[in-house]
């Protein structure tokens, strides 16, 4: 919260936040989950390329959101078991907006606790992304490369827009 609420530039916030995200979020696990059944049919090269792109997409999404948050705080609620995961209730408090309830699913199978999903307004972010990716690939004949090209195009567009700012 100190980084998010700081007067640092968006680029500096992103630079400070991303190591924390990498340490505390199972980005590769979420990425594999989001690719769904197509992970198994993707070649090892496609899997590797996809995970590189997924990391960039996630970093861009986080950076884009950082600018939306000023004067925010979190309150942590109950922690309950949800299968192999711990479900951590949290409330995001933003100035002049109603509190937003969410849940973080945290898994410790890697040896340290890592966030594997965020559920906001009853919707799983990783499941929503998985459905989007799966339907996109299915609409394009089951071709994983089509998704890789689309993700690269999204990253290129984001980078071009960021360079203009």
Image (tube, rainbow, N blue to C red):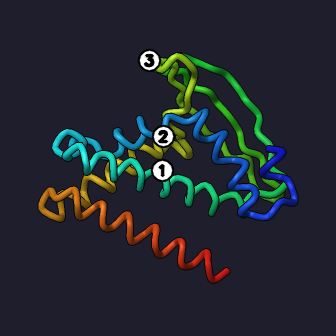
**Residue at the (74%, 55%) spot, across then down:** 13
N-term-proximal mark, 2 vs 3: 2
Residue 163 drawn at (x, y percent): 61, 78
Taking the view exactly as shown, the residue that stands out farthest to the left is 141
Residue positioned 23% across, 43% down in the render = 44
Q: Nearer the viewer, mark 2 or mark 3?
A: 2
- CB-based contact (under 8 Å), mark 1 and mark 2: yes
Label 1 element class: helix
Q: Quadrant of residue 75?
A: top right
Left or right position of 70 against 85: right
Front residue of 52/85: it is 52
Helix, strand or loop at label 3? It is: loop
- Secondary structure of the residue carrying tag 2 is helix
Q: Compute the Cα span from label 1 to label 3.
A: 24 Å
- Which circle marks residue 41 in the picture? none
Q: Position of residue 96 (x, y in %)?
A: 82, 59
Which dot marks residue 55?
1
The residue at the point 79 percent across, 44 percent down is: 1
Q: Which residue is tagged 2? A: 27
Task: Establish if 78 lies above or below 6.
Answer: above
Of the numbered discs 1 and 3, the one sitting upstream in the chain is 1
Quadrant of the rendering where the C terminus is positioned = bottom right
Q: Mark 3 and mark 2 in contact (Cβ < 8 Å)? A: no
Marks 1/2: CA–CA distance = 7 Å
Name the mark nearer the viewer: 1 or 3.
1
Residue 13 seen in the current view = yes
Image location of residue 107, percent across then percent down: 50, 23
Task: Say the numbered circle drawn on residue 84.
Answer: 3
Crowd rating for badge 2 (residues with CA inside 10 Å; few <14, some 14–19, many 20+): many
Q: CA distance from mark 2 to mark 3?
A: 18 Å
Q: Is residue 103 visible?
A: no
Local crowd at mark 3 within 10 Å, few (<14), some, or many (≥20)?
A: few
């Amino acid at each position: 919260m100190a980084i998010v609420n700081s007067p640092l530039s968006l680029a500096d916030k992103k630079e400070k936040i991303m190591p924390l995200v990498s340490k505390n979020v199972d980005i590769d696990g979420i990425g594999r989950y989001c690719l769904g059944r197509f992970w198994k049919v993707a070649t090892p090269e496609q899997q590797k390329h996809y995970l590189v792109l997924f990391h960039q997409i996630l970093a861009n999404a986080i950076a884009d959101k950082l600018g939306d948050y000023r004067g925010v705080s979190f309150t942590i609620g109950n922690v309950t078991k949800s299968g192999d995961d711990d479900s951590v209730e949290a409330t995001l408090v933003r100035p002049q907006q109603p509190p937003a309830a969410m849940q973080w699913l945290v898994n410790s199978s890697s040896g340290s606790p890592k966030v594997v999903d965020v559920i906001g307004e009853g919707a799983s972010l990783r499941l929503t992304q998985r459905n989007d990716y799966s339907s996109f690939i299915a609409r394009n004949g089951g071709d994983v490369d089509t998704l890789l090209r689309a993700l690269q195009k999204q990253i290129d567009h984001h980078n071009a827009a960021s360079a203009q700012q």
